[in-house]
Amino acid sequence: MDINAAKEFIIKKHKGQIRLGGEAYSSHPIAVAELMRSKALSEETIITALFHDLLEDTDATEEEILDLSNQKVLKAVKLLTKYDGYVMNEYIDNIKMNKTALCVKLADRIHNLRCAIIANEQFKQKYIAETEKYYIPIGEGTIFEQDLLESLVELKKSL
């Protein structure tokens, strides 16, 4: 697996997509991957972080993901993908059973919390409630617990 090739792939697939703050969407999975790297997590976990929104937000296929990674990465990406009609409790329960998916989801939430500072008050309140209900419990005892709590506190302060 090649992290640089994975990064080039996600930049291409997310081309034209913009984040709330106006930056290229690909900046988000890259930031999530950097959180993985900062925690000295595996190359598979870093690539999963890069790929975590591909199936949900682009025309990328499972085969393309598999060509650039492996079955473990693809499985985690599929667990991280919210499909039409998904049930949040089932989504979270499935993620909890896969260490790679769990790490990526927590880092994804941390980055999104940090970026939500610029969102409107209604969005912030919804995001805070969802984080407290679903993500704080699954983050307990992980290497992301402190970052998650700190990011949540910062978002609350911005209200």
Image (tube, rainbow, N blue to C red):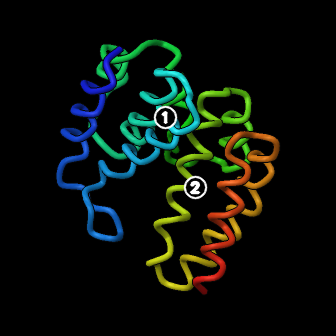
Counting from the top left corner in percent of width and height, residue 68 is at 32, 17
Counting from the top left corner in percent of width and height, residue 58 is at 30, 42
Residue ID for mark 1? 37
Left or right, residue 70 beside residue 147: left
**Who's the residue at 66% across and 67% down the image?**
152
Counting from the top left corner in percent of width and height, residue 33 is at 44, 39
Quarter placement of the N terminus: top left
Question: Tag 1's secondary structure?
Answer: helix
Quarter placement of the C terminus: bottom right
Counting from the top left corner in percent of width and height, residue 24 is at 25, 57
Whether residue 41 is situated above or below residue 153 in the rendered picture: above
Left or right, residue 136 beside residue 50: right
Q: Amino acid at mark 2?
A: Ile
**Who's the residue at 18% across and 54% down the image?**
16
Q: Nearer the viewer, residue 65 or 143?
A: 143
Residue ID for mark 2? 110
Q: Nearer the viewer, residue 122 or 21?
A: 21
**Who's the residue at 57% across and 54% down the image?**
109
Question: Comparing marks 1 and 2, which lies closer to the viewer?
Answer: 1
Gap between marks 1 and 2, in whole Å?
Answer: 14 Å
**Mark 2, residues whose alpha carbon is within 10 Å: few (<14), some, or many (≥20)?**
many
Whether residue 152 is situated above or below residue 38 in the rendered picture: below
